[in-house]
Image (cartoon, rainbow, N blue to C red):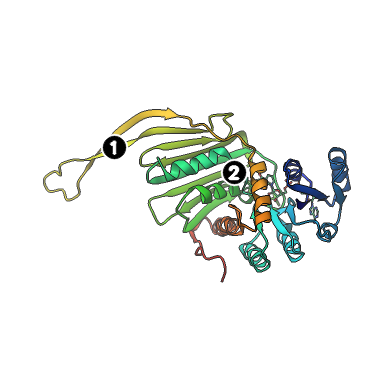
Amino acid sequence: MIGIGVIGYGYWGPNLVRNFADIPSVDLRWVCDLQTERLARLRLRYPAVQITEDMNTVLADPKVDAVAIATPVSTHFDLAMQALKAGKSVFVEKPITATSEEAQRLIEEADKRGLVIAVDHTFIHTGAVKKLRELIKGDLGEVYYYDSVRVNLGMFQRDVSVMWDLAVHDLSIMDFVLDARPVAVSAIGMAHVDGSPENIAYLNLHFDCKLMAHVHVNWLAPLKVRRTLVGGSNKMVVYDDLEPSEKIKVYDRGITLDPMAPKAGERINQMRIGYRAGDMFAPQLDIVEALGAELSEFVTCVEQGKGPIADGAAGLRVVRILEAATRSMANGGVVVKLPGERVLA
Ligand SMILES: NC(=O)c1ccc[n+]([C@@H]2O[C@H](COP(=O)([O-])OP(=O)(O)OC[C@H]3O[C@@H](n4cnc5c(N)ncnc54)[C@H](O)[C@@H]3O)[C@@H](O)[C@H]2O)c1
């Protein structure tokens, strides 16, 4: 059995608790939160789970192998570092940390101690995103663009902007499905509430190939939209996460190019553009709960000392983009280069 402690029982923590409680090889030993009334709610549903307001109590339990951290972003680094130093593997909510330097330090600490560090990039464990990855690696051809909209009348967060709250999902999905990595980013955004971080943002990701990506996130939209378009040279995909079953639709549509004979005196050959409008199909998707699959993977990694799909390095790549986008936004949307892929100095 793998002993687990969950730190943070606010909005998202109960989902971690529910899913850990369903994994047969998990001994869910502790839930910790600073707010006693939240723990009282937990006690009613999970009377066998011990509760505490002090994370040190959890870390002092030798039967706890790993902790899952679902507290505000600004606290992720300190809590995760304390856990690693106490010899516990860590599953931490997205984004992994508030800075890339912090993420790098967590990766180094986990490596040094032979512990697992995983970040909750929930969407990469959904059937839809797994299918999107399969299509991008197969039928789509050369990927030309990735265009994502994630907007709703959302909960304004005090410690993070909409970009650090919602675009994390798009960036982690892109990190998982695309072979290419962005080399630079530019972003604009705005705060409509004084003293609050930006509630609307537009990010452009630049690649050193013929691919462009755009992410639009907004907490001040009248409708909930979760839609991504991916255009390839052979096929195109629409991924709509709000569709109940047909979340992925593959369109056999695009253009055909035929060279035209050059006119006298013209140096460049003109291309004749034709349009191809073939079938649409909606592939069958896995319907397991993503968070359950993700936590099962984490527990297996702790048991076997393996690295998870969304490891510290994946968390770091996403935070590097968010940091660069934040710098761009503060400087009127200038293009900010992303550092190389090497994780450790
Ligand atoms: N993966 C997802 O789809 C998803 C969805 C929502 C939130 N999240 C992430 O989950 C994290 C928490 O978000 P939330 O919306 O649940 O926040 P929240 O404010 O509702 O809950 C956070 C809880 O942490 C507790 N807490 C804070 N510091 C603590 C400490 N030192 N020890 C113990 N408890 C402490 C607070 O008392 C609170 O109950 C964030 O990182 C957020 O980005 C992820």
- Disc nearer the start of the sequence (2/1): 2
Determine whether, in the image, residue 323 is placed left or right of residue 258. Answer: right
Q: Left or right: 200 with respect to 208? A: right
* Closest to the observer, 321 or 280: 280
Residue under label 2: 125
Write down the residue under mark 1. 256
Name the kind of residue labelled 2 in the image.
Answer: His
Name the outermost residue toward the left.
Answer: 264
Q: Position of residue 289 (x, y in %)?
A: 65, 38
Which residue lies at the image location 44% right of the left edge and 33% below the top edge?
250
Q: Residue 342 at what x, y percent from top left?
A: 52, 66
Q: Is mark 2 within 8 Å of ligand 1?
A: no
Q: Tag 1: residue type?
A: Thr
344 on left or right of 235: right
Q: Are marks 2 and 1 in contact (CB under 8 Å)?
A: no
Mark 2 or 1, which is nearer the eye? 2
- The residue at label 1 has a CB less than 8 Å from ligand 1: no
Badge 1 marks a residue whose secondary structure is: strand
| Residue 17 in the image, given as x and y percentages of width and height | 76, 44
Q: Nearer the viewer, residue 59 or 32?
A: 59
Q: Secondary structure at mark 2?
A: helix
- The residue shown at (51%, 31%) is 284
What residue is drawn where x is 54% and y is 44%?
216
- Crowd around label 1: few <14 · some 14–19 · many ≥20 (10 Å): few
